[in-house]
Amino acid sequence: MFSILKKNKLLLTATLGSIILVSIFEIGKAQLTSHVLNSVIIKTGSFMKWGTLFMGFTVCFCIMSFVQKKLVIQVKSVSWKSMNENLIRYYMQMGPGQFAKQTDASSLINEFNTKIVKIVTIYESAWLNLFYFGAGFLLGSIYIGIEQIGILLFIYIATLLTLFYNSRFANKMKEKQLTCVESEKEWIGMIKSFAQSFRTVKIYNYESSMGQKLDEKNQELTNSWNRFESFLKLLSASNDLFTQIVYFGILLIGVWMISRNRLTIGQLMGILQACNLVTMGMMNFSELYNQIQSSSFLLNEYLEKTQEDKNRKEKESKPVGFNEIEIRDLTFSYDGKKDILTDVNFRIQKGKKYLIIGESGQGKSTFLNLLLKNIETNSIFLDHKPIQELSYSVYVQNFACVYQNEPLLPGTLKENIVLNNKIDEYELIEKLHAFHLDSLIDRLDLPLQEDAPQISGGQLQKIHILRSLLSQRNILILDEAFSALDQENAKLIERMILEDANFTVLSVSHKITDANLALYDEILEVKDGRIIRKEKGNQNLLRFDKKFWDLTDACEKDAFRKN
């Protein structure tokens, strides 16, 4: 808990201080009770005096109790916020390859939602309650020890027996807690799978079977939580039983001592009042300790994850320029057996345009992932410097990427297009006109959660292309960037990009037009793990290369046949 709140020491100190003050008020209540009952004759005047005193005490106690509860809520809120921020920073430091390797959408939801909630509501709450009961136990012990040490020893012996009883169930509680966490993780994964495959479920009339699977997983989650909560309630009931035994034991001992004139009624009532602080502290200690132990693994996982890169320094702090990227003797395999890419050698030079073709499964995506540093390699050099010596965030400042199916970011449409770039409003509107996105101009400031369903696939792809151009990065990666566009729009936008001398372009495409083909400086075919250079773009390439003929759309083929 202290590691989470170390940046909010003042808040934590105020919270713990308020807890101590509430415990002091509890002891004050016991002392007040003792004084009232020790009064032999309560006259009208004394009654009014005690009534006024009780009223003032009660008001002060209620105010202090409210402040303490409010501070506890604030501590939990700050912890929740701080943990989310640390987790966000941790994931933001990753490259896409490392991110994909470590997590997926359901795991991420589970991390931010379920695990952090449990750390705050179980682990941190248990620590705060432990401090509360600990303060009450200490102050109550001092009060009872002053009044009657024998009764205090009886309380200690009884509660130590209770602690021993509870300690027997610590491992069982941790096991049930782990089961609940795993069940929640599986449930989130099932919901994610259902959402992603909803269209398939409906098309193939799979609703009944899918609903049954969801019901089964939901039942598993419910059962695991019921077992865990029932186990907690059973332990709590056992502790309540011990508390009642201690209470009546103190009452009997107190009555016996009163009969021997070793204790007054007022003292006994004060001890019974303070006894709650001692017994509740000791009885709850075991239950809270078990909760801390059973949920501590969640905090340990969180701390290990968020602190492992805390002291890591970026290898490069300033953006690096780009003149040439050299791929030198690149061979890559995922499993160490079958090579995906073999002996790849070529240079990507500033300002040049490269078209990458090849059938599915030949290694195009792997090559792009290696180039973008999503997969580590020691065979790629930026201006003669190995890219593994550059941090991911610095290296990728040279790239802008447009993928075939890329979702929009949270926020408004304008924020999605502009990102962190400073773009004049007039210039942005001009760009939207040029990309035939006039219908979106009035919706630039609408939240996309509400507006996204009204954006077509073609518009979405244009938005991503426009974003990449406005980013002013050196290298554009176009991975089927025109697949959702009609032929005319695809041809015009591709030509506009290829004619811009400021950009180096690597385009993976299955839509080829002869007019734009001539604008590429090199054509690279990925085949059987090797990258083969084709002749430079020219007007007759489609006539003589069957590969390009097969990739050309029907309209282009008709035009060539007529010629």
Image (cartoon, rainbow, N blue to C red):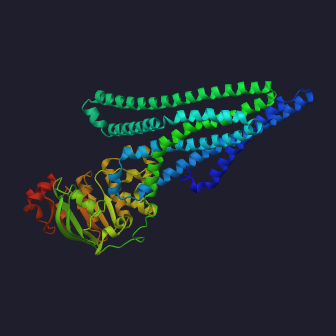
Q: Quadrant of residue 182?
A: top left
Left or right: 380 as drawn, with respect to 17: left
Q: Position of residue 115 (x, y in %)?
A: 46, 44
Left or right: 150 as drawn, with respect to 445: right
The count of marks equals 0
219 relative to 419, above or below: above
320 relative to 175, above or below: below
Q: Position of residue 331 (x, y in %)?
A: 19, 64
Q: Quadrant of residue 137?
A: top right
Q: Position of residue 317 (x, y in %)?
A: 42, 70
Front residue of 140/455: it is: 140
Q: Quadrant of residue 221?
A: top left
Front residue of 25/455: it is: 25
The residue positioned 72% from the left and 27% from the top of the image is 253
In what quadrant of the picture does the C terminus appear?
bottom left
The residue positioned 42% from the left and 31% from the top of the image is 224
Q: Is residue 336 visible?
A: yes
417 relative to 130, above or below: below
Left or right: 117 as drawn, with respect to 364: right
Q: Position of residue 161 (x, y in %)?
A: 58, 33
68 relative to 3, above or below: above
Q: Is residue 64 visible?
A: no
Left or right: 23 as drawn, with respect to 258: left
Question: Which residue sits furthest front?
Answer: 260
The residue positioned 85% from the left and 32% from the top of the image is 50
